Image (spheres, coloured by chain):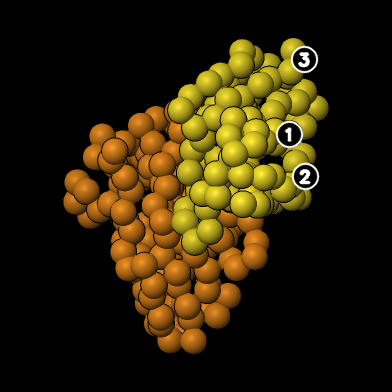
Chain colours: A yellow, B orange
Amino acid sequence: DAKTTQPNSMESNEEEPVHLPCNHSTISGTDYIHWYRQLPSQGPEYVIHGLTSNVNNRMASLAIAEDRKSSTLILHRATLRDAAVYYCILRDDHDPSGNTGKLIFGQGTTLQVKP
Amino acid sequence: EPEVTQTPSHQVTQMGQEVILRCVPISNHLYFYWYRQILGQKVEFLVSFYNNEISEKSEIFDDQFSVERPDGSNFTLKIRSTKLEDSAMYFCASSVGRVSNQPQHFGDGTRLSIL
């Protein structure tokens, strides 16, 4: 899986938007960009994924740069419950080493939300 | 919404003892995974399982580890002779498929403490 780079930590105020960046300059044309998050004392939780176009779901939006070398996870109104570690992960079906679907987690971005 | 369930939530075991961690994946899912997270570290892939056999395993998954799907619902991880360094959170995950546009769903984990 291609490498991603995320800031170690970010802070946000409650009810304000949060933009979590991810750089993936070596992304291949077949890599999907996935975001997961891990709330304290819980397992990772799927948030959103995309390939080329921006994506929206009930949890968040994903903005993908035109060259796909970076992406941004957008939480439109942060709540205290959104305090978590956010992971940006690339997944490729065409990895020549074989792909059994495993996720490779980095350190992620620890998001603090202040009331 | 269906979820992955793991039992027990916390397991305390003496070093050298066998331990079995249990998971009930989401019922229509076909791909199953175990990950672990040592305190303060990244989530690490252990093993993927499909069609009643291991698809891929990491270097961590040595001869002391085994997985089984003994019936149509449970997915278990066994550690034959536990070591102190096996102390970690163990997460089970499942997905409908392995392709890159299908998310994995995680349980809340079993905290394994080896004394």
Q: In the rendered image, is residue B32 in sight? A: yes
Same subunit: marks 2 and 1: yes
Which mark, residue A67? 3
Q: Mark 2 points at which residue?
A: A7
Q: Which amino acid does label 2 sit on?
A: Pro
Foreground mark, 3 or 2, reads 2
Q: Which amino acid does label 1 sit on?
A: Pro
Q: Mark 1 lies on which chain?
A: A
SS class of the residue under badge 3?
loop
Depth check, front residue: A100 or A97? A100
The residue lying at 53 percent from left, 21 percent from top is A56
Question: Is A20 placed left or right of A55 in the picture?
Answer: right
The residue lying at 49 percent from left, 38 percent from top is A46
Same subunit: marks 3 and 1: yes
Q: Which chain carries label 3?
A: A
Percent x, y of residue A104:
61, 44
Q: Quadrant of residue B11?
A: bottom left
Could you tell which of marks 2 and 1 lies nearer the N-terminus? 2
Q: Mark 1 points at which residue?
A: A21
The residue lying at 77 percent from left, 23 percent from top is A69
Percent x, y of residue A100:
49, 36
Q: In the rendered image, is residue B78 in sight? A: no
Percent x, y of residue B75:
30, 53
Residue count near mark 1 (Cα–Cα under 10 Å), binned few <14, some 14–19, many ≥20: some
Q: What residue type is labelled 3?
A: Asp
Callout 2–callout 1 Cβ contact below 8 Å: yes
Callout 3–callout 1 Cβ contact below 8 Å: no
* Separation of marks 3 and 1 at Cα, in angstroms: 15 Å
Count of marks, rendered view: 3
Could you tell which of marks 3 and 1 lies nearer the N-terminus? 1
Residue extending farthest to the right is A25
Percent x, y of residue B30:
32, 36
